[in-house]
Image (tube, helix red, strand yellow):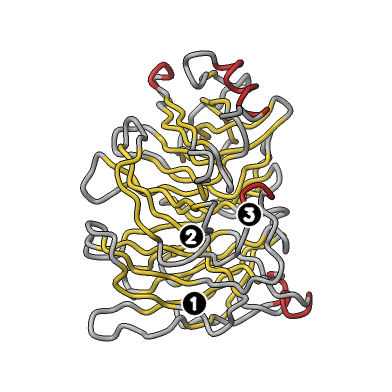
């Protein structure tokens, strides 16, 4: 198998370790009364290349405390119970990593099969000791959910995702099933992220049995040009929020498309279809990430340079402007939003030395 240039460069840099962790040279942030800290795992790129690391945000500033070099751009970052983080390459991805922030010699990188690219996200399995990743069979364009050993990252089992272009997964309440967002975009591995012309989209949300891999239910949006991509669950209302990205041919249709779908999953009152939240053209038809909070959902739009907030009934309520905003996380002190070299936290904008990638996650 030929080694791609990014992989060759990364292997040469990292030798046998697979990753190198270093402390970023930044001025220390000293704690003081009321200066509580919030820690995130994030990915970014800077003048030295692609990286992921731990970021501390305090009322007095932001500091990158630990970082790891990556072979190419990352997408999803999943904190694990043992303190490690599973990092998955941006689709179509050819690597995933289990990073140990406090034990760099135990960090492991695994390369994807040549014709089975990764699609950007991982999910800890309910049984423990294993993870699930979304992938694509490049020969058939079928979506896959792959069970892997959490330590070695070796594949154990492969299931069909019930659609094309699977992206984020989320554990459904009760623990027996998972939700899988099938983005529905036809692509060719050799063409990167380019769409295949003339092939209709087939986006869906499926509920999959986490033990057998069987598809329990399948939901679609009324508009077939909406790609269902990211998920966040609101337990109090039993509502699943779905961030969507419009793939319409006409720009006017894309601009006016909704970016948030809602699925009501309360026992005995389960909806049969995905409900569309109020559309706002300011979001430019692009939902980058979604986050459930106490009284609704935030959805970010890096194309619109803002994040929008919808109440649980799907009504638009407010917005927050931040250039390039995409990454969202919820801390005890409020929502954290990451944009182009900026963080919006608790009503304050902090400068960053880098541009966070699409997602970040809170860590203990």
Image quadrant containing the C terminus = top left
Frontmost residue, 186 versus 89 = 186
* Residue 130 to residue 172: above or below: above
* Residue 184 to residue 322: above or below: below
Instruction: Find residue 61 and name its label.
Output: none
- Residue linked to disc 3: 188
Secondary structure, mark 3, is: loop
- Residue linked to disc 2: 142
- Residue linked to disc 1: 311
Work out whether mark 2 precedes mark 1 in sequence or the reverse, and give the earlier one.
2
Q: Which residue lies at the image location 46% right of the left edge and 67% below the top edge?
A: 163
Q: Which residue lies at the image location 41% right of the left edge and 36% below the top edge?
A: 85
Residue 34 rendering spot, x and y as whole percentages: 46, 40
Residue 154 rendering spot, x and y as whole percentages: 35, 35
Single out the mark in the foreground, 3 or 1.
Answer: 3
Q: Which residue lies at the image location 46% right of the left edge and 28% below the top edge?
A: 109
Q: Which residue lies at the image location 42% right of the left edge and 77% below the top edge?
A: 219
* Residue 301 to residue 151: above or below: below
């Amino acid at each position: 198998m030929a080694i791609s240039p990014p992989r060759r460069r990364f292997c040469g840099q990292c030798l046998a370790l697979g990753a190198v962790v270093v402390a970023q040279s930044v001025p220390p942030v000293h704690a003081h009364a009321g200066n509580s800290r919030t820690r995130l795992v994030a990915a970014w790129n800077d003048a030295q290349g692609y990286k992921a690391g731990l970021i501390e945000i305090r009322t007095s500033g932001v500091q990158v405390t630990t970082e790891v070099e990556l072979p190419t751009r990352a997408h999803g970052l999943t904190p694990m119970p043992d303190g490690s983080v599973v990092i998955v390459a941006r689709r179509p991805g050819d690597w995933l990593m289990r990073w140990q922030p406090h034990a760099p010699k135990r960090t492991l990188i695994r390369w994807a099969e040549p014709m089975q690219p990764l699609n950007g996200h991982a999910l800890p399995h309910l049984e423990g000791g294993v993870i699930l990743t979304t992938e694509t069979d490049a020969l058939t364009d079928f979506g896959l959910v792959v069970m892997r050993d959490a330590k070695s990252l070796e594949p154990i089992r492969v299931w069909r995702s019930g659609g094309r272009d699977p992206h984020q997964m989320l554990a459904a309440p009760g623990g027996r099933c998972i939700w899988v967002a099938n983005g529905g975009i036809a692509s060719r591995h050799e063409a990167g992220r380019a769409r295949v012309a003339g092939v209709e989209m087939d986006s869906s949300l499926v509920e999959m049995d986490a033990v057998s891999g069987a598809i329990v239910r399948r939901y679609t949006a009324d508009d077939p040009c909406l790609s269902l991509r990211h998920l966040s669950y609101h337990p109090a209302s039993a509502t699943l929020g779905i961030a969507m990205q419009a793939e319409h041919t006409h720009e006017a249709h894309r601009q006016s498309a909704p970016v948030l779908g809602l699925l009501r999953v309360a026992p005995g009152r389960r909806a049969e279809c995905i409900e569309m939240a109020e559309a706002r053209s300011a979001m430019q038809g692009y939902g980058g990430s979604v986050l459930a909070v106490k009284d609704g959902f935030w959805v970010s739009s890096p194309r619109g340079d803002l994040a929008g907030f919808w109440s649980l009934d799907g009504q638009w309520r407010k917005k927050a402007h931040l250039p390039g905003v995409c990454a969202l996380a919820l801390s005890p002190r409020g929502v954290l939003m990451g944009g182009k070299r900026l963080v919006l936290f608790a009503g304050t904008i902090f400068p960053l030395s880098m541009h966070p990638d699409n997602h970040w996650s809170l860590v203990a």
